[in-house]
């Protein structure tokens, strides 16, 4: 699991006047809205005696801990300690980590990390979401017992459709499908693929006849974004009928992923058709889930050497490579083994931008341990060899 990325924490309409608890990257957070409607995200662990802030209530623009009522503002700073009264001088270090938030596409995005603004990989663009004239949107959730990186790989893997999704993949023509083009950017990439349906034989394929002329290819355009672990797939069935799936895959912990899914369709836009669309979307999720939850190991292998890739996997590999850059060069990976070793006995916080700015504050909670970037590891080995 990686820090210093934007993740989707919750749907916007799920956070109203009460604090909401969410779990991301194996840690708990509280989301709450102030009187202006601005949503805040804080570490959920109260620095007084470990109360769970999300179990409290919203008081003015603060969240009040349910244990002794300390009030934390949107910056994570304690504003009021009831037992000490109004005149009490609250120490500067009485604060929990607070994280940048943004609301986009009906979702609450939180930046979980301490990187300064200019270093943050931006939230993916999704311009079609606001174009309600041409697209009908549908929101859905899915939960996986699998690591988020595995879920992302599954989403951008076109070859599996021929075997896992009979609704739009065709085993008979798997060999004819091909990647037409791949475009690489900083921490996102897109590919263009053509898939050919088999000859239209057999009555059960009749619905396909309605949407395509014989053997007309389907254009599939998958995109991965490191930010939000987003998978976007655009499927152009023909010139007038397109689908876009925009899935933000949030790592709840190492073994669980929550997908915030938006599906847009450019045809049969009447709400009456939502139920059918949702059913088809969920069927696809279920088919992927069966494969993914049975795959081993649960995590993406540490090195590419432990799985064999072929030419058709090159788009997927671009995601693995970018992820490894963040792990090996930037040192963004949480050291889950260290966290697990003290589970239940020690709480950690994901470091926030203000923690980096004010490292002099002697923060009450320790920052989550990270796996050292490769260069540092090599340095340590070198020093060991020297001594
Ligand atoms: S534990 Fe939160 S106020 Fe005491
Ligand atoms: Fe799939």
Image: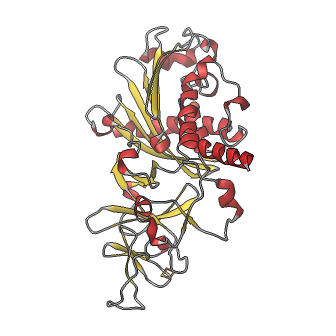
Nearer to me, 282 or 251: 251
In this rendering, position of residue 1 left or right of residue 113: right
Q: Position of residue 221 (x, y in %)?
A: 45, 24
The percent coordinates of residue 207 (x first, y second) are 48, 20
Q: Residue 334 at x, y = what percent?
A: 59, 52
Residue located at (60% from left, 58% from top): 369
Q: Is residue 96 visible?
A: no
- Relative to residue 48, is residue 209 depicted above or below? above
Q: How many marks?
A: 0
| Residue at 71%, 37% in the rendered image | 295
Residue 281 visible in the current orientation: yes
- Left or right of 39: which side holds 146? right
Q: Nearer the viewer, residue 354 or 360?
A: 360
**Position above or below: 93 against 291:** below
Nearest to the observer: residue 382 or residue 333:
382
Give the percent coordinates (x, y) of residue 49: 55, 80
């Amino acid at each position: 699991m990686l820090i210093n990325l934007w993740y989707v924490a919750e749907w916007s309409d799920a956070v109203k006047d009460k604090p909401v608890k969410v779990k991301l990257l194996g840690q708990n957070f509280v989301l709450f809205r102030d009187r202006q409607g601005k949503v805040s995200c804080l570490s959920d662990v109260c620095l007084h005696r470990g109360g769970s802030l999300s179990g409290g209530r919203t008081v003015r623009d603060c969240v009040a801990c349910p244990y002794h009522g300390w009030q934390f503002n949107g910056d994570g700073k304690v504003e009021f300690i009831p037992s000490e009264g109004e005149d009490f001088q609250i120490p500067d270090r009485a604060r929990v980590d607070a994280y940048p938030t943004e609301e986009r596409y009906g979702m609450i995005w939180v930046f979980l990390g301490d990187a300064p603004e200019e270093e943050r990989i931006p939230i993916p663009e999704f311009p079609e979401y606001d174009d309600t004239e041409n697209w009908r949107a549908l929101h859905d959730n899915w939960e996986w017992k699998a690591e988020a990186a595995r879920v992302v790989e599954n989403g951008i893997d076109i070859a599996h459709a021929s075997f896992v999704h009979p609704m739009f993949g065709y085993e008979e023509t798997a060999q004819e499908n091909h990647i037409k083009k791949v475009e690489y950017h900083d921490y996102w990439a897109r590919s263009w693929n053509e898939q050919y349906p088999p000859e239209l034989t057999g009555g059960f394929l009749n619905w396909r006849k309605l949407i395509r002329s014989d053997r007309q290819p389907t254009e599939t355009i998958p995109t991965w974004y490191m930010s939000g672990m987003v998978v976007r797939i655009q499927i152009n069935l023909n010139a007038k009928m397109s689908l876009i799936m925009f899935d933000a895959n949030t790592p709840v912990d190492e073994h669980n992923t929550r997908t915030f899914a938006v599906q847009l369709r450019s045809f049969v836009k009447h709400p009456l058709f939502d139920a059918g669309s949702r059913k088809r979307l969920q069927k696809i999720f279920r088919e992927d889930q069966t494969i993914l939850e049975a795959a081993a190991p649960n995590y993406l292998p540490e090195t590419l050497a432990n799985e064999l890739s072929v030419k058709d996997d090159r788009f997927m590999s671009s995601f693995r490579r970018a992820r490894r850059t963040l792990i090996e060069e930037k040192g963004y990976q949480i050291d889950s083994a260290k966290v697990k070793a003290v589970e239940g006995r020690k709480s950690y916080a994901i470091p926030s931008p203000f923690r980096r700015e004010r490292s002099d504050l002697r923060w009450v909670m320790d920052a989550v341990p990270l796996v050292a970037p490769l260069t540092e590891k090599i340095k340590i080995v070198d020093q060991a060899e020297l001594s």
